[in-house]
Image (cartoon, coloured by chain):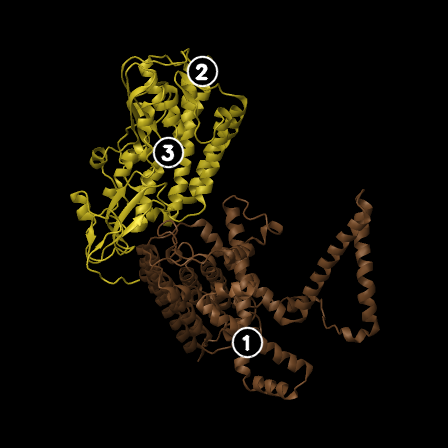
Chain colours: A brown, B yellow
Amino acid sequence: MTLTRSWSRLTPAGKIVVPLLAIVVALTVALLLGMVTGIVPAITGAVLDTLEANVGIVRFVVAILAVLLFTIPTAFIVGYLELKAIAFMNLRLGPNRVGPWGTLAAAFHGFKILAKEDFTPTGADVPVFTLAPAVVFLAPVLAFLVLPFAPGLFGQDMNIALLYFFAMGGLGVVGLMMAGWSSFNKYSLLGALRAAAQIISYEIPLTLSVVGLILLAGTLSLNQIVLNQQGSFLDWYVWQQPLGFAIFFIAATAEGNRTPFDLTEADSEIVAGFATEYSGMRFGFFYFAEYVNVFLLSALTVVLYFGGWLAPIDIGAVLHQVGLTFDPALDPGSLGLGLLLGILIVPPLAIVALALPFWAFRSGLPFWKALVVGFLLFNVIAAGATLLWAVASFEVVEGLLWFMAKTYVFVAILVWMRATLPRVRIDQLMGFAWKWLLPAALVNLFVTALALIVIDAVKG
Amino acid sequence: MSTTPQARVRSLDDPELYVETPATIFDAIPPYPPRTEREAEFYSVREGEMLINLGPQHPSTHGVLRVVLKIDGERVVDLDPVLGYLHRGVEKICENSDWHMVVSHCDPLEYIASMFSELVPVMAAEKLLDVEVPRRAEYIRVLACELNRISSHALFMGWLALDLGGLTPILYGFIERDEIVEMLAALTGQKLLFNYMRIGGVNGDLNHEFMSRLGDWMGHAAQRIEDSQTLINENEIFVKRTRGLGVIDRETALRMCLSGPPLRATGIPYDVRRAHPYGVYPELEFEIPTREEGDSYARYQLHLDEIKQSIHIIDQVLHKLPDGPVMAKLPRLLRPRPGRAFAAIESPRGQYAVYAMSDGTDQPFRLRIHDPSYFNLQSVGLLTPGHLIADTMAIMASLDPIMGGVDK
């Protein structure tokens, strides 16, 4: 009964998609069951062979899925940061109800948006109106694919990664134009035209500002660019390309439609620009895209100018010089039965040991409460120790930590700018791009090229 | 959505009117047919131009102002302000209320600084009744008004920045407003519409909580105003967006009947507190800050200067405050003499005046309210054409209209 009612409520498109989805899910489950149980060995063999033959495609699919999943927590974290950091700068408390310090507020905003009505205004161009948020959201997701997070942790290692990155970044404006045009609203139209003018204008200084860096690096591969900056923090490209960095960061702010260049949504002028007519999850996609974009631009800044996943100083080497050597090589298998004993005996003893001081020094605290505190403390210590061990033994973990830390510094700077600066006007925005950023980028390119030639001549 | 052209269909807006094609959303900006020559000219759109509705529900029209903009790309070619969305007929209601009720009806006109909009009818009634207001009451009136002026100006600075896209200054402005509003709530029992002024005095003497809050606030007010102005005063983007924007020269300002900060920003030191002194202002010492430029930035800076002068006035009032009653002895039912009275004060937005006629009954025969917001807002039509859409907000915010007073 419920099923029939749900079915009759589906849109025509939904009536096609839902059975298809069911078939795909059923097939996948059947295939997996067949593989696991080995009932039909032929299937297993055939599937494995197909996967092996198309390893490139498999890698791509896995990478794009991972990136797609990665955007969700990223958007929530950046969104929370924006709520909370701007609140503190505004002398407000910010979100403080859901979760500790309101950390779940952004996630609950996401759920709330899912539950809201998806409204399509009269006169809208429905297919374009529906597709636009997906285009806007997928552009940064596709750009994520070439971003190196840590040594060996990236979607695809392209030799034209930087070019691809800018191409995908520029794709977002198509989605904004679609949204603005199809909404059948004059404010949306103005926002879309602003977006087109702004993003296309700023793409030029953005791309030109990294040409000097490309000359230095001799490659367009983001992995290689990071590897070129190996050493201490003095080897990062920001010291060789300070002007390039400044131009890049300003232009990237404009690319991401962030304050002071958030003219496309300018809520005090054109209400919300291209997003005026959107509601529900379609509006949510725009927000997702914005936050993902913030992360993405910060990440690219870090990769290009701040050494990506590399540590500012090689801690291992420094420790070695001091005389401390830390050998994290730990083989749990060598302990044999002792490992089992350790797992069984050490945690309870440690919990009791940690609980005892609380029980002893806090009068009136029941012992079970002290045990809970001990349990929590033990977990924190164990997690910390595991993390420390992972950082020491795996390059990927260490690299990822450094990368995230650096990226969130730039995310914080973008949030800070949003809380601090008013918005520029459209003519000032365009004037700034064409009269200041573009010549400066050209000067940067010229000086870099000249310096390279001079150094070559002196050396050779 | 494309509409197929049909022969003759009734217009969506006027059933009496036949149009060639059914009006789409894009065409449906009234009035059809135009009522005046000016409307006919304005609503006939040339090639490349577009009409766009700014308001009545828009984040930066400060209430329910509706402006129809005729734009060419981003540039505003012409505009047509449409007023009356908040019209309540206060003047007419006042004719059917007795003099005490008039105060309450006038209270929400200038709702950001309602001490002023309730003081004026009170002063007009006192002139008709020939009442001598106790000196302590006069001083308390000055105190309450100047506090309210500061709270209104603090909010103005935040609003201007908010309309230019800055998120933070409005909340810094709200700190001052919050503290002052709490203070006045301790004094009057209300936070927005105080109903504190009474014909013949004020409603209640200063109390301990008010004085202690005021003392706390006076200790750090000047310093904090200085602090919060560093947020935007030297900000390159803010200065570039407001300097040289919406410039009014002196002759135009006088012709447009501007008053308050927009007038003083053009260099004319007209302030009702000095030009036509009322209350105890002659006994107090303060300057009338002026600026020469007449642009949005000058108006913003003028507000800062006026806050400093107001703090100075409050300081003097606290030193000079005499003892005595706060209400004159008056009968419950007020029957002023038949006649006319005009009272004007300097509100945060300019000259706020009331012209009252009495026929000897307990109700005013006629009460005409002159609200400065209305006259300042007129100049938008003169200042905006030729500027960009974004500048419309900067100009409108710098004129600081309150729609409650404009629409009455």
Q: Amino acid at mark 2?
A: Val
Quarter occupied by the N terminus of chain B = bottom left
Number of the front mark, 1 or 2: 1
Q: Please give the label number shown on residue A394.
A: none
Q: Please give the label number shown on residue B326.
A: 2
Q: Position of residue A267 (x, y in %)?
A: 39, 51
Chain letter behind tag 2: B
The reply to the same-chain question for discs 3 and 1 is no
Please report the residue visible at 28 percent of the width from the left and 32 percent of the height from the top. Answer: B259
Rounded to the nearest whole Å, what is the CA distance between mark 2 and mark 3? 31 Å
Question: Looking at this view, is B140 or B320 the one in front?
Answer: B140
* B35 left or right of A30 in image: left
Residue A228 seen in this snapshot: no
Q: Position of residue A203 (x, y in %)?
A: 37, 66
Of all residues, the one furthest to the left in this rendering is B37
Q: Which quadrant holds residue A122?
A: bottom left
Secondary structure beneath dot 3 equals helix
Q: Position of residue A345 (x, y in %)?
A: 83, 63
Chain letter behind tag 1: A
Q: Amino acid at mark 1?
A: Val
Residue contact between numbered discs 3 and 1, judged by CB atoms under 8 Å:
no
Q: Residues within 10 Å of mark 3 (few under 14, many from 20)?
A: some
* A223 left or right of B394 in image: right
Rounded to the nearest whole Å, what is the CA distance between mark 1 and mark 2? 83 Å
Rounded to the nearest whole Å, what is the CA distance between mark 3 and mark 1? 71 Å
For mark 1, what is the residue? A24
For mark 3, what is the residue? B305
Q: Residues within 10 Å of mark 2 (few under 14, many from 20)?
A: many
Identify whether A388 is placed above or below A163: above
Number of the front mark, 3 or 1: 1
